Image (cartoon, rainbow, N blue to C red):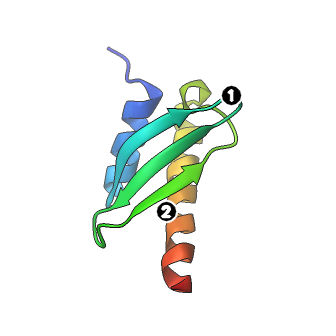
């Protein structure tokens, strides 16, 4: 059975010590709620497109982008 994009994203984030909590679907983009397992903090990340329309390579890029954004936010504080 093929995996859905949200399952692939959940697995990719888990590899990066992040937990996918929710994906909120908007009119033109999604908002992803992610928890950093190391700090316990919860972050929101806006996508440029819908997660459901992404292929596996794009989801891996998205997971990397989320990880980098969280590093930036944590280092600013």
**For the point 63% across and 44% down, which residue is it?**
47
Point out residue 64 in the picture as x, y percentages from the top left corner. 53, 57
Look at mark 1 in the image and give the residue it sits on.
27
Element under label 2? helix
Q: Nearer the viewer, mark 1 or mark 2?
A: 1
Q: Tell me the element at label 1.
A: loop
Q: Is residue 37 visible?
A: yes
Seen from the viewer's position, the closer of residues 51 and 16 is: 51
How far is mark 1 from mark 2, CA to CA?
Answer: 25 Å
Query: Which image quarter: residue 41?
Result: bottom left
* Earlier-in-chain disc, 1 versus 2: 1
The residue lying at 41 percent from left, 53 percent from top is: 34
Disc assigned to residue 39: none
Which quadrant holds residue 17?
A: bottom left
Q: Mark 2 points at which residue?
A: 67
Q: Is residue 4 above or below residue 46?
A: above
67 and 23: which one is in front? 23
Q: Where is residue 67 in the image (x, y as percent from the top left)?
A: 49, 62
Residue 16 showing in the rendered view: no
Q: Nearer the viewer, residue 25 or 52?
A: 25
Q: Position of residue 29 (x, y in %)?
A: 66, 36
Q: Callout 2 environment at 10 Å: few (<14), some (14 to 19), or many (20+)?
A: some
Residue sitting at x 36%, y 42%: 10
**Mark 1, other Cα within 10 Å: few <14 / some 14–19 / many ≥20:** few
């Amino acid at each position: 059975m093929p995996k859905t994009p949200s399952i692939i994203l959940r697995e990719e984030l888990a590899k990066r010590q992040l937990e996918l909590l929710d994906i909120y679907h908007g009119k033109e983009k999604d908002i992803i709620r992610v928890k950093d397992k190391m700090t316990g903090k919860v972050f929101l990340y806006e996508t440029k497109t819908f997660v459901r329309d992404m292929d596996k390579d794009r989801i891996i890029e998205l997971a990397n982008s989320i990880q980098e954004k969280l590093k930036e936010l944590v280092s600013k504080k």
